[in-house]
Image (tube, coloured by chain):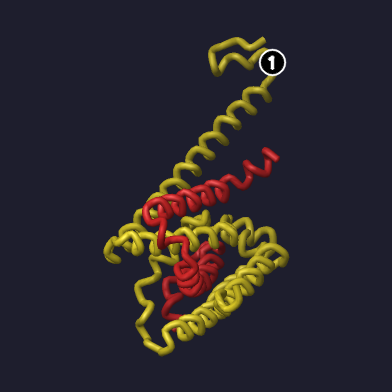
Amino acid sequence: LPGTFPVLGLLRIGLVILTAWLLKYTVLGRSIYALGGSQVAAVRVGFNIFATRLFVYAFMGFISGFASVVHTALVQSAIPNSIVGRELDIIAAVVVGGASITGGSGSILGTCLGVALLAMLGNGLTLIGMSSYWNNVMVGLVLLVGVTMSAVQRNLQAKRRVTNLDGAAMMARPAHQRGTSSGMPLA
Amino acid sequence: MRRFLYSHRDLIALTSVLIGVAAIMLLLNPERFLTLNNLRSMAFQLPEVGILTLAMMVTMLHGGINLAVLGTAI
């Protein structure tokens, strides 16, 4: 298949590998995760919050520069407001990919899968013959489902953790007091 | 193995949804979805949103959000 794969795709693959390496194998990437998980904990561990935050936004600008090169190569002209309004697509792809909005969790692979899902959905709907106005509706629907599922999952996890703590506290008591809280003698 | 499946259950769910969407599209439009031209046009459109998504993901991982990513890009 020579000539079918675009050069821009190679650029994207290179950037994905760069970001994945950065997030997984450098102290800086780990500190980004730590900062997203809990800022207080990251400060107490000793990460430099200011440097990390500066790097994050600078890195975002760096990658946005590549994206603008790609966009200019695609449309072959520089229109200042040609992709304004696509933020929803981008945020939907990130959230569907499993990243939490409050930070601290998410992966490169999930994000790539989210992008592929949204692209396939839009393309397929256009091919079926739906009006392209419905494309935004589908993106919003996918975003809603993704956010709801992650929230429900987090609630379930929190509940499970609480019940586990209850069980551990009950087992930690002396044997003759164990049954008193649940009303059922154990031993 | 079970531990691996459990720790990657989000990715597995996402992959199955992706395969399901692809199957539905293939059922609804079998003669045009899986053609070389369509795949090529998808491969041309993907990198733009994909690269912007990388930028947004790093920002969201660290706990913030930057809605000016498109403004920075252009």
Q: Which residue is at the far front? A: B31
| Left or right side of A135 for B8 | right
Q: Nearer the viewer, residue A17 or A162?
A: A17
Q: Residue at x 37, y 53 (%)?
A: B28
Q: x, y (%) of residue A40?
A: 59, 57
Colour yellow maps to chain? A
Local packing at callout 1 (Cα closer than 10 Å; few below 14, some 14-19, many 20+) is: few
Q: x, y (%) of residue B55?
A: 53, 71
The residue to which callout 1 is attached is A175
Q: Residue at x 40, y 69 (%)?
A: A87
Q: Residue at x 60, y 76 (%)?
A: A2
Is residue A152 shown to the viewer in this render?
Answer: yes
Give the SS element for disc 1.
Answer: helix
Is residue A55 shown to the viewer in this render?
Answer: no
Q: Quadrant of residue B62?
A: bottom right
The N terminus of chain A appears in which quarter of the rendering? bottom right
Q: x, y (%) of residue B4?
A: 67, 44
Q: Nearer the viewer, residue A4 or A149?
A: A4
Q: Residue at x 39, y 54 (%)?
A: A142
**How many marks overall?**
1
Q: x, y (%) of residue B31?
A: 41, 59
Q: Nearer the viewer, residue A64 or A70?
A: A70
Colour red maps to chain? B
Q: Amino acid at mark 1?
A: Ala
The C terminus of chain A appears in which quarter of the rendering? top right
| Left or right side of A21 for A147 | left
Q: Nearer the viewer, residue B50 or A151?
A: B50
For disc 1, the chain is A
Q: Quadrant of residue A165?
A: top right
